[in-house]
Image (cartoon, grey):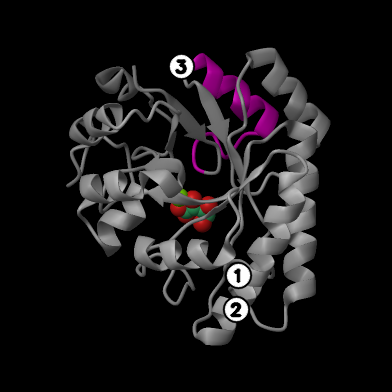
Amino acid sequence: MTKFSANLGFLWNDKPLPEAIKLAHQAGYSAVECHWPYQFDADEVKAALQETGLTMLGLNTDRGDVAKGENGLSALPGREAQAQAAIDQAIDYAVKTNTLNIHVMAGFSSGVEAEKTFIHNLQYAADRAKLHNINILIEPLNHYDAPDYFLQTSEQAKGILQQVKRDNVKLMFDCYHLQIMEGDICRRLEKLMPIIGHIQIASVPDRQEPNTGELNYAYVFSKLKELGYSKPIGAEYKPKTGSVDSSWLTEYR
Ligand SMILES: O=C(O)[C@H](O)C(=O)CO
Ligand SMILES: [Mg+2]
């Protein structure tokens, strides 16, 4: 049976996070994940997780000054202090809510110095997260939604992970972004499985319910089953009608 995690950055994101967790549980999700939970009291989030029995699979580091267009800090040379403060904040929240993974956001940058900075900040994050059994994730984003984002492909991510040299830093394989940037999803899943920490889905190209669009997720899920992947898959999509309808879940379970 394929299990799914509700991404509460997109699903029920008009509700307070503790309420969204309960709605995800009622809708039949096996886990939850979020984007930036920091405005919500960690104790209340933890209580909702305990009440529902759901696990929070992931949260993101702060993006920086969003009004100025920032989308992460960890690959920005000269911003190490802020990037590491964002990592500390994420670890603190993850510890309080028993969250399993932290997505360290790179930001808009490019070049050798940006890569060195990203690797250095990832090592900082990995060593601190390890003390709490938390994994660090890095995620390539597609160049339509996040033009000039530092990390754009799984090949680039693999090279970064080889240089970071920490076993608790993994790839967040978002099928939506990687279908747009590289395609060949099933072969890539197979090849990259040893370094994959979490998988996310949405339809391509509209980023809506996964049972529409150019990617055949029934086939992708059968491939994941064949590969022995049994963790919940992150449903990170924008509901077509604006309100969440999880009836697509029954097609894949
Ligand atoms: O947009 C995504 O795919 C993400 O997973 C995210 O964490 C925010 O950029
Ligand atoms: Mg994603």
Question: Quadrant where the N terminus lies?
Answer: top left
Q: Secondary structure at mark 3?
A: loop
Helix, strand or loop status at disc 2: helix
Is residue 47 part of the magenta span, yes or no? no
Q: Nearer the viewer, mark 2 or mark 3?
A: 2
What's the residue type where badge 1 is placed?
Ile
Q: Earlier in the sequence, mark 3 or mark 1?
A: 3
* Residue 77, x across and y down, in percent: 66, 82
Closer to the camera: disc 3 or disc 1?
A: 1
Label 3 CB less than 8 angstroms from ligand 2: no
Identify the mark at residue 116; answer none if there is no mark.
Answer: 2
Can residue 140 be seen here? The reply is yes
In this rendering, does residue 38 appear at all? Answer: no
Identity of the residue drawn at 44% across and 63% down = 157
Amino acid type, mark 3: Gly
Q: In the rendered image, which residue does mark 3 sit on?
A: 28
| Residue toward you, 200 or 20 | 200
Where 33 sits versus 144, above or below?
A: above
Taking the spot 39% from the left edge, 38% from the top edge, the residue there is 239
Compute the Cα span from label 2 to label 3. Answer: 42 Å
- Residue that label 1 marks: 119
Residue shown at the point (29%, 49%) measured from the top left? 191
Q: Position of residue 87 (x, y in %)?
A: 73, 57
Mark-to-mark CA distance, 1 and 2: 5 Å
Q: Position of residue 213 (x, y in %)?
A: 20, 44
In the image, 194: left or right of 68?
A: left
Q: Are marks 2 and 3 in contact (CB under 8 Å)?
A: no
Amino acid on which disc 2 is placed: Lys
Magenta span: 10-27
Along the horizontal axis of the image, is 121 left or right of 233? right
